[in-house]
């Protein structure tokens, strides 16, 4: 029982990080039909911006976090939208898919060349202590990760549901044509989703990097996890991404403990295939209308 | 013969001449890279059939190249003749591709990309973990090269011409296929599946066929790859190869006959030429791809098509790559 609780908490913590990346992923898809194959690298990158601030400019950790956050939102949000997505979105999904694959490669190789190819330690948000809950050893870090992720998601939901801008964004996601007729500045709403995505991946990056260490290749698995979480949960629902992320994190931890460690990575893939075949809209998704 | 046709014909002739003469002036590593280009091109031609002509996004091509390579490696190291392995690899991948095509009947576009992505990852895990069969991370060593009519292929240059001959064979077969009623049906599938169905095209069978033929070519490519490098381990058959093959097809020009050949030049040869920049070559490569996609989303051949097209374009007509390419090449 204690083992199960332990695995569950650790799984939820990993899952919460996947969920953050997955939410951003679904937001981009909903508002601009952008499938971002560089999402994993987007999660890898902000940690290096923070590290660069600390090593090259001797900033204290908290200041480096703020600078890193601002830079991430500018580079991964604003520049990504303006320089890459805007010129290509009118040509359909495929060229943009290729461009984001190339962007992922670019980010990965740039970090490797200009920072380091070695894994770097990254300071955690708080000292790691082990807490005993009902006989289970739970790391405080897992709880902090969970708390921060829940706070980020709650903030996002509040913003989307309770503010005027948030509701305009939802309208844009549901039906851009009608939103435009209603006088919503659709272009600006789409830009906001890119900025939100950048903010979410930065939070995910700061949470995940103390656990996995900062390495240029971190994005490969994180991107795949975000991807699968988004599809399993439902590609067109923020809730779906959360459920998908948590489910994936928990299953991943249980599979590693009780199944074979070698085929641990296969579990998410099998879930993905089953979900796509039998419930392509995802566990919580709505059925999208076909255009033909 | 219009000026455009003449231009395309001249380009093809020059390319062929270079392919035939260049290896005599290259060191073994250069010949190896050219052979790799030929082998990769075969897999990319297969993907171009699935994606460029039939419009089904597949990220499973790496898995098929891997399956083909492992089948060829296992059979030839156990003393079976190369051509038996070659045919087995092609047929096995054709069958698996057919099965994988069933999801394509249910889901479309990005969902299909995700299913095939999962398949590639699963295949990679099997290559890596089933040590009794694939040798796991230690791989399979000493894969023999075949001899053709008693002519040994041990020398790099001989094997290069062997690969080139196979590429020519595959290219000719594909050329014939896309001009046959089947190829027309594939294009109908891409352009408007509902209309194709209403016109009596059995979209179900053709979707499966597009998948299976593309996969079979992937398997053939793998069967040539194994004796080319003579050692295989799981690393080259990861998802990265699938992305790379997709990139080749789109960068070259999806739906153009020569698209995958040009794309393979970009993806296999260009990084080698950029090596003088040392560590920065992949960065430069990524930037080039992004810039190309921004300025010409239809790829390099789409760009060439646009540049050589006469100014008096018909108004409002969408460009059909197949028709345009037929006009350009034949």
Image: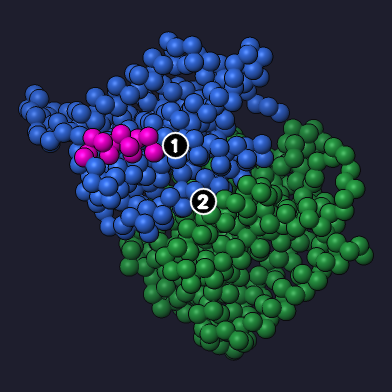
Chain colours: A blue, B green
**Residue A77 image offset from top left, x and y in percent:** 46, 35
Task: Please report the residue visible at 78 percent of the width from the left and 52 percent of the height from the top.
Answer: B306
Task: Please report the residue visible at 82 percent of the width from the left and 52 percent of the height from the top.
Answer: B324
**Residue B260 image offset from top left, x and y in percent:** 65, 60
In the rendered image, which quarter contains the C terminus of chain B? bottom right
**Residue A258 image offset from top left, x and y in percent:** 22, 40
Horizontal side of residue A278 vs A291, given as left or right: left
* Label 2 residue SS: helix
Label 2 marks a residue whose chain is A
SS assignment for the magenta stretch, majority = helix
Mark nearer the N terminus (2 vs 1): 1
User: Which region shows up in magenta?
Assistant: A60-71
* Label 1 residue SS: helix
Horizontal side of residue B49 vs A47, given as left or right: right
Horizontal side of residue A251 vs B20, given as left or right: left
**Residue A26 image offset from top left, x and y in percent:** 48, 29
Task: Please report the residue visible at 33 percent of the width from the left and 39 percent of the height from the top.
Answer: A68
Task: Please report the residue visible at 47 percent of the width from the left and 79 percent of the height from the top.
Answer: B144
Label 1 marks a residue whose chain is A
> Residue under circle 2?
A102
Q: Of tags 2 and 1, which is closer to the observer?
A: 1
Indicate whether residue B15 is drawn in magenta.
no
In depth, the one of B308 and A255 nearer the eye is B308
Query: Hey, which quadrant is residue A208 in on the image?
Result: top left
Q: Is residue B258 above or below residue A275?
A: below
Marks 2 & 1, CB-CB < 8 Å contact: no
> Residue under circle 1?
A74
Q: CA distance from mark 2 to mark 1?
A: 19 Å
Query: Hey, which quadrant is residue A180 in on the image?
Result: top right
């Amino acid at each position: 029982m204690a083992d199960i609780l332990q695995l569950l908490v650790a799984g939820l913590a990993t899952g919460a990080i996947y969920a953050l990346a997955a939410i951003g992923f679904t937001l981009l898809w909903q508002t601009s039909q952008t499938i971002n194959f560089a999402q994993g690298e987007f999660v890898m990158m902000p940690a290096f911006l923070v590290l660069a601030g600390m090593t090259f400019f001797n900033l204290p950790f908290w200041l480096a976090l703020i600078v890193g956050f601002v830079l991430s939102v500018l580079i991964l949000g604003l520049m990504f939208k303006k320089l890459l997505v805007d010129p290509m979105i009118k040509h359909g999904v495929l060229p943009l898919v290729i461009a984001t694959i190339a962007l992922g490669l670019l980010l990965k190789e740039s970090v490797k060349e200009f920072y380091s190819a070695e894994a770097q330690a990254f300071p955690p948000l708080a000292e790691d202590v082990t807490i005993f809950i009902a006989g289970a050893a739970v790391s405080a870090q897992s709880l902090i990760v969970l708390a921060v992720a829940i706070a980020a998601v709650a903030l996002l939901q509040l913003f989307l549901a309770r503010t005027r801008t948030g509701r305009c964004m939802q309208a844009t996601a549901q039906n851009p044509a009608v939103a435009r007729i209603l006088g919503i500045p659709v272009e600006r709403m789409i830009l906001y989703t890119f900025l939100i995505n950048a903010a979410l991946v930065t939070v995910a990056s700061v949470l995940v990097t103390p656990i996995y260490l900062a390495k240029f290749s971190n994005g490969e698995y994180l991107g795949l996890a975000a991807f699968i979480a988004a599809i399993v949960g439902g590609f067109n629902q923020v809730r779906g991404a959360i459920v998908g992320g948590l489910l994936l994190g928990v299953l991943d931890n249980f599979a590693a403990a009780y199944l074979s460690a070698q085929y641990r990575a296969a579990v998410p893939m099998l879930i993905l295939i089953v979900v796509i075949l039998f419930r392509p809209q995802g566990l919580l998704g709505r059925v999208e209308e076909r255009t033909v | 013969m219009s000026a455009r046709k003449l231009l395309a014909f001249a380009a093809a002739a020059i390319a062929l001449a270079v392919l035939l003469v260049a290896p005599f002036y290259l060191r073994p590593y250069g010949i190896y890279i050219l052979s790799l280009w030929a082998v990769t091109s075969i897999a990319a031609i297969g993907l171009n059939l699935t994606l460029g002509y039939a419009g089904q996004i597949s990220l499973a091509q790496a898995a098929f190249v891997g399956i083909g390579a492992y089948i060829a490696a296992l059979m030839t190291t156990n003393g079976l003749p190369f051509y038996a392995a070659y045919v087995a690899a092609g047929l096995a991948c054709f069958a698996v591709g057919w099965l994988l095509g069933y999801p394509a009947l249910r889901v479309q576009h990005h969902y299909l990309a995700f299913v095939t992505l999962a398949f590639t990852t699963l295949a990679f895990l099997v290559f890596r973990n089933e040590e009794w069969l694939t040798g796991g991370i230690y791989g399979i060593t000493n894969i023999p090269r075949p001899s053709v009519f008693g002519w040994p292929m041990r020398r790099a240059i001989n094997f290069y011409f062997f690969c080139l001959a196979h590429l020519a064979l595959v290219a000719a077969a594909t050329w014939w296929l896309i001009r046959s009623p089947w190829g027309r049906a594939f294009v109908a599938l891409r352009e408007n599946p509902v209309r194709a169905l209403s016109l009596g095209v059995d979209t179900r069978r053709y979707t499966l066929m597009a998948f299976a033929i593309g996969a079979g070519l992937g398997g053939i490519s793998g069967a040539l790859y194994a004796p080319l490098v003579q050692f295989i381990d799981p690393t080259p058959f990861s998802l990265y190869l699938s992305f790379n093959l997709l990139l080749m097809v789109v960068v070259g020009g999806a739906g153009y006959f020569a698209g995958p050949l040009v794309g393979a030049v970009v993806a296999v040869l260009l990084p080698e030429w950029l090596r003088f920049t040392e560590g920065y070559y992949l960065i430069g490569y990524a930037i080039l791809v992004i810039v190309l996609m921004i300025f010409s989303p239809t790829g390099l051949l789409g760009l060439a098509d646009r540049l050589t097209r006469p100014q008096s374009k018909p108004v409002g007509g969408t460009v059909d790559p197949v028709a345009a390419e037929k006009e350009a090449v034949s």
